[in-house]
Image (cartoon, helix red, strand yellow):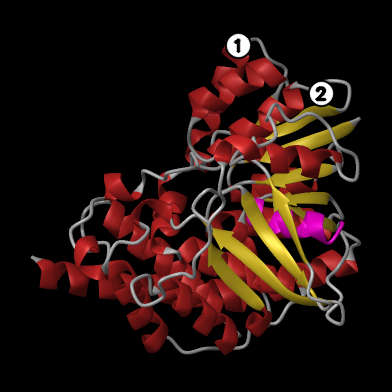
Amino acid sequence: MRRIALLGATGSIGASALDVIARHPDRFAVSVLSAHARVDELVALCRRHRPQHAVIGQAGKYAALRDGLAAAGLPTQAHAGPQALAEAAADAESDTVIAAIVGAAGIASTLAAARAGKRLLLANKESVVLAGDLLMRECRANSTQIIPIDSEHNAIFQCLNGQPADLAKVAKLILTASGGPFLNRSRAELAGVTAEQACRHPNWSMGRKISVDSATLMNKGLEVIEAHWLFGMPAARIDVLVHPQSIIHSLVEQADGSVLAQLGRPDMRTTLACGLAWPERVASGVAAPDLGALGALTFQPPDRATFACLDLAYAALNAGGTAPATLNAANEVAVDAFLHGHIGFLDIPAAIAATLDACDIAPAADLDALLAADAAARRQAGTQVRRLAGANA
């Protein structure tokens, strides 16, 4: 029986994870559930899944969570705040942690799980982007197994059969991208797009921030950085290929010229079932793709000139040090400003590029240095957002 700590239970990844877990009560049980601020939703999930612990990220909502659990007649213990999240990730009552907290807020709990030697199912790509070197060092030091849950890296994980990439045998990693809702649009056509349009992903059901990242191709840029750290692959040997059907989730090119690919429907329950049961296979609730009905799978190179975020991510990875942390922070600030209507869609890469130019790159020596870079980038990105908003007024 694997006991699961699910951090980020009220998001789309959390919902998919709980669906898979519920299908296998003989294999998996939930020991911890967490949410950022949605107390009522967290209590409802506790009522169904009966964890030993529930954590609300916002410390001020502890009383609401405690009282909600008591009113539901649950023995689940209430906890609140970032420190409680980190403690829950390391708690001995769980052997597996699903890290599904969105953004840089998930890094402390992800690192805590790594230090505790947990089986780490990683859905929080920002933790790897912000602190990839640090995270991988902790995993090596504590014999922590990382199984990536996002579809692209899980596909590579499967193609490599869960083993590290052998650079003598693996020529290239190829991440596929759907192209998002604005595939084949020109820059001129993107000038006036709205947040609602950007969030209408053609294939995946995702949160608003990651949906915008998909629309800008920043999501793929972050995944390039993530692939570098997870699989030890140089940036020059990580490619991106647009595949609108989202059936092939990524590919691994071998030194002999053969290419391995992982196929599946665009449903996160597939990767979660893989991560939860690996190296075994269990039912996910997702049917295999009907290739005959699909008829054709198509591919094209990304339009890097129109979707500039992809090259910004490569540039940050090649710069090294705190540059990826700066990129990630600037992107979070810019996307939030776009979602609130303060800047336009094309202002997102402009704000990120200006922030990268304005911020110094320092060695990524430890978490304090990375968090300092993150904070400095957020301040600088805020300045750039205000500048762009003023220019658009």
Q: Distance between the residues labelled 1 and 2?
A: 25 Å
Q: Give the residue drawn at x 78%, y 75%.
A: 257
Q: Can residue 154 be seen in this view?
A: yes
Residue at which label 1 appears: 72
Work out which quarter of the rendered image holds the C terminus and state it: bottom left
- What are the residue bounds of the magenta stretch? 151-161
Q: Decide: marks 1, 2 in contact (CB < 8 A)?
A: no
| As drawn, 5 above or below 340 | above
| 73 vs 137, nearest the viewer | 137
Q: Can residue 55 be seen in this view?
A: no
| Label 1 Cα neighbours within 10 Å, binned few <14 / some 14-19 / many ≥20 | few
Which mark, by number, is residue 302?
none
- Above or below residue 160? Residue 249 is above
Vertical placement of residue 187 versus 123, above or below:
below
Query: Which three-letter amino acid code belongs to the residue tagged 1?
Result: Ala
Q: Is residue 128 shown left or right of residue 392?
A: right
Label 1 SS: loop
| Image-quadrant location for residue 344 | bottom left
User: How far across and how far down the image is residue 283, in percent?
Assistant: 79, 28
Q: Main secondary structure of the magenta part?
A: helix
| Disc 2 secondary structure class | loop
Residue 167 locus on image (x, y percent)? 83, 80
The N terminus: image quadrant: top right
Magenta stretch encompasses residue 158: yes
Whether residue 165 appears in magenta in the rendering, the answer is no
Mark 2, residue position: 24
Nearer the N terminus, badge 1 or badge 2?
2
Residue nearer the viewer, 330 or 291:
291
Amino acid beneath label 2: His
Horizontal side of 375 relative to 281 (left or right) equals: left
Select label 1 or label 2 by which is in front.
2
Which residue is pictured at 55% across the width and 33% down the height? Answer: 10
